[in-house]
Image (cartoon, grey):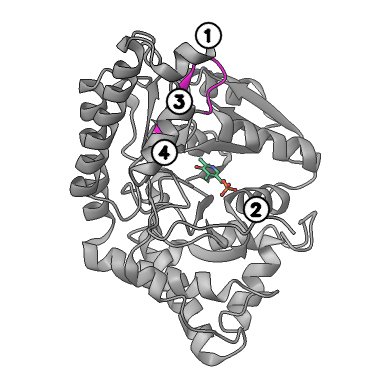
Amino acid sequence: MGAPVTVMENACTLLTPGPLTTSEGVRQAMQKDWCTWDEDYLALVRDIRSRLSGLASADPRSYTAVLLQGSGTYGVESVLGTAIPPAGKLLVLANGAYGQRIGMIARTLGIRHTLLEFPETSPIDLVAVDEILSSDPSLTHVAAVHVETTTGLLNPVAELGRIVRESGRSFILDAMSSFGGIPMDLREIGVDFAVTSANKCLQGVPGFCIVLARPAALEASEGQACSLSLDLHDQWRTMETQGGKWRFTSPTHAVSAFHKALLELDEEGGIPARHRRFCENQVLVAEGMTALGFRLLISPQWQSPIITTFLVPDDLPGFDFATFYRWMKQSGFLIYPGKLTQVDSFRIGNIGQVDSAVLKRFLEAAEKCLFRFREQSTKPLGRERREKE
Ligand SMILES: *Cc1c(COP(=O)(O)O)cnc(C)c1O
């Protein structure tokens, strides 16, 4: 038998883009067991769906919310596998790992597609998108990521949406790490399908994803799905006709937690208030870390209020991320490694139940860590090191 696993008594603050630090209320909402067919549970699901439609657009009837078991990627895969007909062709716009993942899904599902790539540090180039849509009439759908969580870069979706709409194509938006944290009206952008997750800006726990779709676009996709469990149309039909029932067993505790999270979003003042908090958090972290000597990867012009990428300082002798991570964890903060293909970096997320008070403590802890690094690199050889040599 292996050694027993020890879990830290006091949980760390998660400075990650999800799963993230949830509120006491959200965690408490998981203390009860639910029957998936019971009317109380179905009423909860119906209320969640109607609240999500309200968050999607000023005209709530224009978007229907489909809840689907699994993480965010399952939602993206269900949209691609359900909405794009066999004769369709998808344009994938990628300036980071999540855009690349959309391309990977298309490849895996055998969906005809073109992958248009851009550097990780610059937004999607609208001129290039316009050009390819004009030159390839066989393209029927366009998929893009709103906030590229790889870097924290915010893509220009309003302009992109206009180009896609004017070209008569269908628009699929990965709004995973933006929906609920950045004000947007999906109808104004011209989105046909948007995908988000329970455990990002909406501050629930992991367990399911959310697709916000124009009902007509969903209607048109009937019978097209290339998967049974990820058949978005069938999932929607069942929810609509059976009073909020999911086709297969749903993550009841996560659903209950999510309902509480939506009530708390309302109490906070809705998406505009949450956006203000996230913006304040991001500025605090970016300015504080910059003052400590870290450099920003993304130009402030394209920086989202969700997560920030910092370059590992090369003028700080002895700095290494693994040690930094360990020390920060001992101080009560979980930070996020980098995901860049080109440069050495790490990320600090500022979504979830965190505010400036928490982040000030985080910055103090980070400063102490840097002090330890400096101390280590200037200290004369200690006994331990002398003995080794
Ligand atoms: C989190 C995230 C996803 C989905 O990731 P999962 O691990 O499947 O939840 C997709 N796109 C973006 C931009 C994300 O931030």
Helix, strand or loop for disc 1? loop
The spot of residue 321 in percent (x, y) is 45, 25
Per the image, the residue denoted by label 3 is 321
Asked if the residue under mark 1 is in contact with the one under mark 4, i.e. CB atoms within 8 Å, the reply is: no
Q: Amino acid at mark 1?
A: Glu
Disc 2 packing (10 Å; few <14; some 14–19; many ≥20): many
Q: Quadrant of ligand 1?
A: top right
Q: Amino acid at mark 2?
A: Tyr
Q: Residue at left 54%, top 19%?
A: 118
Which of discs 1 and 3 lies nearer the camera? The answer is 1
Q: Residue at left 33%, top 43%?
A: 331
Q: Residue at left 41%, top 69%?
A: 27
Disc 4 packing (10 Å; few <14; some 14–19; many ≥20): many
Helix, strand or loop for disc 3? helix
Q: Is residue 41 left or right of residue 359?
A: right
The spot of residue 364 in percent (x, y) is 22, 35
**Label for residue 74?**
2
Q: Residue at left 72%, top 32%?
A: 113
Helix, strand or loop for disc 2? helix
Per the image, the residue denoted by label 1 is 389
Per the image, the residue denoted by label 4 is 335
Q: Quadrant of residue 359?
A: top left
The earlier-in-sequence mark between 4 and 1 is 4
The earlier-in-sequence mark between 3 and 4 is 3
Mark 2 vs mark 1, CA separation in Å:
53 Å
- What span is colored magenta in the figure? 339-347
User: Is 185 or 246 nearer to us in this picture?
Assistant: 246
